[in-house]
Amino acid sequence: GAGVSQTPSNKVTEKGKYVELRCDPISGHTALYWYRQSLGQGPEFLIYFQGTGAADDSGLPNDRFFAVRPEGSVSTLKIQRTERGDSAVYLCASSFDGLAGTQYFGPGTRLTVL
Amino acid sequence: DAKTTQPTSMDCAEGRAANLPCNHSTISGNEYVYWYRQIHSQGPQYIIHGLKNNETNEMASLIITEDRKSSTLILPHATLRDTAVYYCIVRVANTGNQFYFGTGTSLTVIP
């Protein structure tokens, strides 16, 4: 079956602009995670959804970052007033129910803020 | 979740077994050991996980010491396509907790 998909694959924007990154999880997966990966580092957790609600948003760096999952499937990560330090690969993962453990990752969106 | 310690990098000859170690000396009784890998420019790929028994699947074997303070991921016949960064993660079961990836081991398979 189809895996986790993310769009766009690459996004270049200017400092101060607003961006949205989309994640389509595996069908039927109720848990969805966003991570951010900087060059040379492992992925770092941002936020976790169980269904439509954010169960843990402790990894969001500041209030410029926000994520939604209104129907419990597709999720959008929103970044306001982008800064050069936001440049990274943003990864999305989904899991069947958040309890089974195994997370399946998408290919990521590479965000570049000029 | 407990932290893990892995070597920064390793080399392995093509066709030989690749043995990737991981220390997790502060692991709790309800924490599983997971292994993921990340090939350049791709998202992390699940490999295997286990609690205390050794596990094997089509990709790899996972050997966990009896005291569970360390484990080894074994790729039995490494190929060039196994060149990747390998992450060892410990995580409490039955929670929605995130994975703490660390910096992993960069494995290079040499022809």
Image (tube, rainbow, N blue to C red):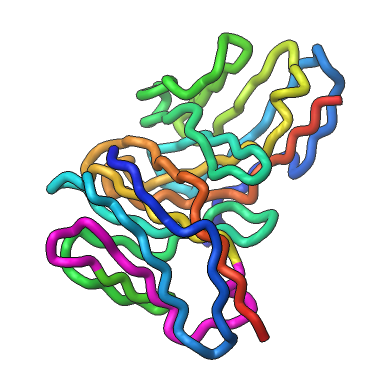
Image position of B55 with respect to B94: above or below: below
Q: In the image, A76: left or right of B27?
A: right
Q: Tag count in the figure?
A: 0
Q: Is residue B10 left or right of residue A112?
A: left
On the image, the x and y values in percent for residue B77 come to: 48, 86
Task: Give me the residue at 62% from left, 61% from top.
Answer: B39
Q: Is residue B66 magenta?
A: yes
Q: Which of the 4 image quarters holds residue B98?
A: top left
Q: Is residue B106 magenta?
A: no
Q: Which residue sits at x=55%, y=18%?
A: A61
The quarter of the rendered structure image containing the C terminus of chain A is: top right
- Residue A89, by quadrant, is top right
Residue B99 image point, x, y percent: 40, 42
Task: Inspect this view and state whether residue B37 appears.
Answer: no
The magenta stretch is B64-83
Give the side of residue B66 with respect to residue A38, left or right.
left
Q: Quadrant of residue A38?
A: top right
Q: Is residue A71 visible?
A: yes
**In the image, what residue occupies the spot 56% across and 68% down?**
B107
Residue at the spot 22% in from the left edge and 45% down from the top edge? B26
Image position of A19 with respect to B61: above or below: above
Give coordinates of residue A23: x percent, y percent: 60, 38
Q: Examine the rendered structure and indicate whether residue A80 appears above or below residue B38.
A: above
Residue at the bottom extreme, as displayed: B15
* Residue placed most toward the observer, A112 or A22: A112
The location of residue B75, given as percent across then percent down, is: 44, 78
